[in-house]
Image (spheres, coloured by chain):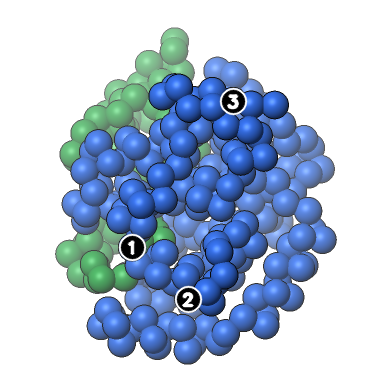
Amino acid sequence: MTKEFQDGTVRTVDELMNPLELFVRYGQSCSHIQKDILKKITSEEHIKIERMCFGEVPTDEKFMRKSFPIAFEWLDVIADGKPLDEDIIDGYFLFYHNRRIHEKQGNYRKVPATLRTFCLARVAQIKEVITHDGTPVYRCEDEGELLTSIGRVVKDAEVGEWIITHQGLTVRKISLDRLDRLANMYAKTPGYEAIARSLELRHGFVR
Amino acid sequence: MCFAIPGKVVSIDKDTQTAEVDYDVEIRTVGIPLLPELKIGDYVLVQAKIAVQIVPEKQVEQFKESLAVLDESEEEL
């Protein structure tokens, strides 16, 4: 099965869930602050990120590395010379990114709780599926907290299934077996503190 | 850093279940079927052009104050 993008590119389904496509599903939500607050990307670049996220154009690694340079530096350190894959991307958000938020590191200590926790990558179980203008909306639960997640890029999730939701967007479905495997894998990666220190030294910021 | 940016509801169209949301830099039209209690002046978080959560105004004020002291050298997300 193939999909034709708006720019005419045709790719197979297997290629659709490549690591970069997964990354941009997480990253597009965060690109608003890059555009509106920090002015690090232009409106045109922001639109391109959104279109990549929603599958309207293929991902562009060079462009993404330019748009999220420090995040990719983290990912490359975690990958330790291996190609980026889905495990590295999901693990980065579920364990590194979430840890920084939970521990209120760096800028996260300056931001109110609602806005901070909305940025967590959360694993939640779907309790109800409703539809708005053809887009599924998942009412889901994470440790007793009810969440709303928009299924713009994951349209086939069903009640009882588990998803990763980030800033209100359903990033992907995930099995609890895979979640366990990721947690075990990340427990064995190079120490978080060592990676953080190395990047602090390079960029001069304090966590 | 990865933060949600709240926008202020400046108008509501109940017929189309949409609202105009002001982000200072631009006004965006978003769907509001998930937040029937929404009213003008509320602040919301939006995903894929659908408002998904109301943010308490006090937290919005805290957020605005925090913008002046953000460290721009941190990773993007």
For the residues labelled 1 and 2, the Cα–Cα distance comes to: 13 Å
| Parent chain of label 2 | A
Disc sitting over residue A3 in the figure: 3
Mark 1 on the same chain as mark 2: yes
Residue shown at 57% from the left, 32% from the top: A11
* Residue contact at pointers 1 and 2, CB within 8 angstroms: no
- Tell me how many marks there are: 3
Residue shown at 25% from the left, 83% from the top: A204
Q: Colour of chain A?
A: blue
Q: Earlier in the sequence, mark 1 or mark 2?
A: 1
Q: Earlier in the sequence, mark 2 or mark 3?
A: 3
Amino acid at circle 2: Val
The quadrant where residue B67 appears:
bottom left
For the residues labelled 2 and 3, the Cα–Cα distance comes to: 33 Å
B35 left or right, relative to A60: right
* Chain appearing in green on the rendered image: B
* Residue contact at pointers 2 and 3, CB within 8 angstroms: no
- Residue A119 picture location, percent across and down: 47, 57
Disc sitting over residue A77 in the figure: 2
Q: Earlier in the sequence, mark 3 or mark 1?
A: 3
